Amino acid sequence: MTLDSHTCYRALKARDARFDGRFFVAVSSTRIYCRPVCTVKPPKRENCRFFPSAAAAESNGYRPCLRCRPELAPGNASVDATSRLAQAAASMMEDRTLDQDGLDTLAVRLGITDRHLRRAFGAEFGVSPVEFAQTQRLLLAKRLLTDTALPVTEVAFASGFGSVRRFNALFKQRYRLIPSQLRSPLRGGAPVAAAVDVLKFELSFRPPFDWSAVSAFLAARSIAGVEAVEGSCYRRTVRILIDGKEHRGWIAIEMSPKKPTLRVAVSASLAKALPPVLSRVKALMDLACHPAEVAQALGALAKRHPGLRVPGAFDGFEMAVRAILGQQVTVVAARTVAGRFAATFGDPIETPFASLTTLFPTAMCVAALSPGRIARLGMPGARARTVVALAGAVADGRLVLMPNADIEATLDELRALPGVGEWTAQYIAMRALSWPDAFPHTDLGVMKALGETGARRVLAAGEAWRPWRAYAVMHLWQSLTKE
């Protein structure tokens, strides 16, 4: 990634939130690196170096600022092929894929060679994938030490370190601190407690963020028992598999009242699954969005709802099943059937919330069902067979429904499933794959908003909104709602 030092320094002096997460500034006189929105007095220009990632700054001997906390910077969505590839790899690292499978397997999942992956990664982040992953583990540990009361031993393992000794040594080497020092009240750290029921985090975004529209969108499509929007808070149950072990719990997300962050509460039962949990929350809430770029591309269409995001998916398989259940029926009808589906085939879970009672069934579970059992919930047999076919493809690894997956290959795999047409494939790409240019042009709501009756004319109209057509779809749908 090429950084223009003049532009970076101007953004730093202005504390321009549009550049938050796009670069980091390192100060040679203090050996500390910061986000461009840091509230400290801007350093002299001659003392500044600019890096494309926190990992690049740390590999050059700088340690993170304790005030602006680089680990809280938002990510970067991209439509550029090389950048998107590198971001896909980074997303997998956040999900701990590199820890479990290694770089070769990660490259295979992306459909490229490990050499190509290293090149793309270095171009985007300025470091190797291994160096990036190491920095991510350290920054997560720093966040857990500051924001939670987890014991240091649990912090080390939750962050992906194989031993406490290795964690302590690397933390001291990189940050010139011992982990317990971040627990000091003078540094704003969390107090040590004997037991922790809930872990709390803040995840940053680039403002504006239309939370009311996004939460309303999720509420209308929520699966009863699995997720709910109550007041201004989105909650859901969670099931995540790591190293063959299943972790169960719940999360709750709401907007911070004064800062450009989302507050995320995570049940303590998910402490050992925090990297993928937080990574999926970021995808669900589209926190890597650059709203200024989207607004510029969409023009007048985006003016009514600045900061409207494209809600992603916490679980790609769950979202894809929900999309199939929604074929050719209303949103309300699809929600009813999805609730029955989860209640019938999912697993019960205890939570502090009366609205959260169920874990959505796994792909392996659904693949073993007969289409007839699913159809009895109130849908055509053909649609039930589509659900089973989807589950089989996900269960055996032919279909990977995650952000930044290979778009064309995944779309081809989806279209090959019986009963999956262009609307379903594009909607899944829009949400489960977080593809910003997905465009379900046959959608009746999109047609109505545009005043068109022909899919070809809708497709032609969408050309003006490339490469952000998924955001255009959200704005078109929003234009149909009553306010």
Image: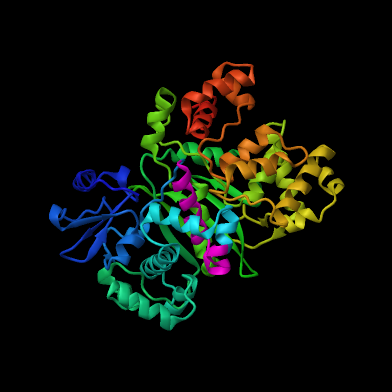
116 over 309 or under it: above or below: below
Q: How is the image coloured?
A: rainbow
Q: Position of residue 315 (x, y in %)?
A: 61, 52
How many marks the image carries: the answer is 0
> Which residue is nearer to you in this view: 104 or 201?
104
**Residue 15 inside the magenta-drawn segment:** no
> Which residue is nearer to you in this view: 34 or 302?
34
**What is the magenta range?**
80-104
| Left/right of residue 126 with respect to residue 154 in the rendered view | left
| Left/right of residue 443 with respect to residue 234 in the rendered view | right
| Left/right of residue 372 with respect to residue 483 in the rendered view | right
| Left/right of residue 478 with respect to residue 40 in the rendered view | right
6 over 273 or under it: above or below: above
Q: Is residue 7 visible?
A: yes
Point out the residue furthest to the bottom here. 165
Q: Residue at x 69, y 37 (%)?
A: 326
Q: Is residue 269 visible?
A: no
Q: Position of residue 377 (x, y in %)?
A: 80, 44
Q: Main secondary structure of the magenta part?
A: helix
Answer with the quarter of the image where residue 73 lies: bottom left
> Which residue is nearer to you in this view: 221 or 282?
282
Q: Position of residue 289 (x, y in %)?
A: 43, 42
Q: Position of residue 191 (x, y in %)?
A: 36, 73
Q: Residue at x 84, y 39 (%)?
A: 381
